[in-house]
Amino acid sequence: MSLWSGFDPLIKEWFLERIGQPTDPQTQGWPQIRSGQDVLISAPTGSGKTLAAFLHCLDGLVRQARTGDMPDAVQAVYVSPLKALSNDIQKNLERPLAEIRELAERRGVDLAPIRTALRTGDTNAYKRQQMLVRPPHILVTTPESLYILLTAKRSREILGSARTLIVDEIHAVADDKRGAHLALSVERLQRLVEQQGGELQRIGLSATVSPIEEVAQFLRPSSKTASVQIVQVGHSRPMKLAVETMDDELGAVASQEMWGQVHDRLAELIQQNRTTLIFVNTRRLAERVTHALEERLGEACVAAHHGSLAKQLRLDAEERLKRGELRAVVATASLELGIDIGTIDLVC
């Protein structure tokens, strides 16, 4: 059977035109997902895991959109432990959907709108209300926001129609309390779906970890673990690692001269690369280092990113870095270690 035999012609044409040839996680993952079983895809960042998980879901929605039979109901829930990744996924879904709709118009196919929505701690009250009035077909959220949705009657009602659950970066939560909390929410979602007579397919996305069987057990605990189909694709990337220190002897408190050397070296490294991420451990230090680098490189080259900044300022810094308008971003943990921020040449 051809890899594309089960997909709508619009999906196939869009993928080959816009994306190109499928990657290993996609060619191995799509048949398993199409079978309806729970699937865990383990592959390095940038290898196409997310589209491996989403394409079958998009295919089903496009088939419904062709007929105009698109109920106002959540059909897929995407959960990421990283808020920055959730923001990015929602935008990366809007683009393919717009391109597929444009392709359909060129082919004379009338498609009903396919909606997505983002629900995180940053989602304002108006958008939360709109989500309840007219539920999205694909809901993008975080573990904490999923828990909140499951505890309120009105939001809980819109989740029972879900048929696909995608848990991204699952390895990041599989062994901690946050993961245990998410596992409880997943089981509650499963119960809601079953109460409405449906079945919930679970798709996990993981970095290359070992033993992968333990992550599979987190995705589907109990005796059903054996039904989780594991797609494991791994390869190593070349990476240069260097440790640098100052010429002067280090002490308990760095002198102004030492900080000057640090900032000079960072500015030098930034100029040698297209994009640079610099991580610091406090918001105050993020502002301090940003100011020092702005003095050396110019205000248009560097931006700060931390939790005290407004959401729009953080997103603006991320987008400008991705577009190449910024040379460097100085961040705390607010940038979630740069996951899915785009191509980065250097991390300090």
Image (cartoon, rainbow, N blue to C red):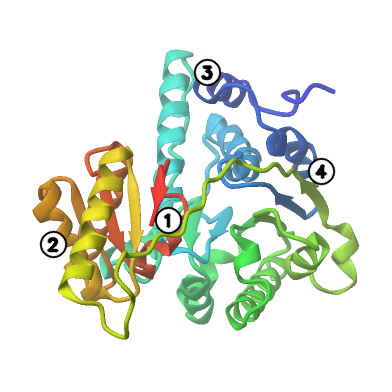
Q: CA distance from mark 3 to mark 1?
A: 29 Å
Do the numbered discs 2 and 3 sit on residues whose CB atoms are within 8 Å?
Answer: no
Find disc 3 in the rendering and name its residue: 17
Image position, residue 123 (x, y; %): 32, 66
Find disc 1 in the rendering and name its residue: 338
Mark 3, Cα crowd under 10 Å, few <14 / some 14-19 / many 20+, is few
Image position, residue 152 (x, y; %): 47, 80
Name the N-terminal-most of marks 4 and 1: 4
Residue at the top extreme? 107
Q: Is residue 170 left or right of residue 228?
A: left
Residue in front for this viewpoint, 292 or 16: 292
Name the N-terminal-most of marks 1 and 2: 2
Q: CA distance from mark 2 to mark 3?
A: 44 Å
Q: Nearer the viewer, mark 3 or mark 4?
A: 3
Q: Nearer the viewer, mark 4 or mark 2?
A: 2
Q: Amino acid at mark 2?
A: His
Q: Amino acid at mark 3?
A: Glu
Find disc 2 in the rendering and name its residue: 291
Q: CA distance from mark 3 to mark 4?
A: 26 Å
Q: Residue at x 22, y 59 (%)?
A: 263
Image position, residue 318 (x, y; %): 30, 51
Q: Is residue 267 left or right of residue 207?
A: left
Q: Is residue 312 visible?
A: no
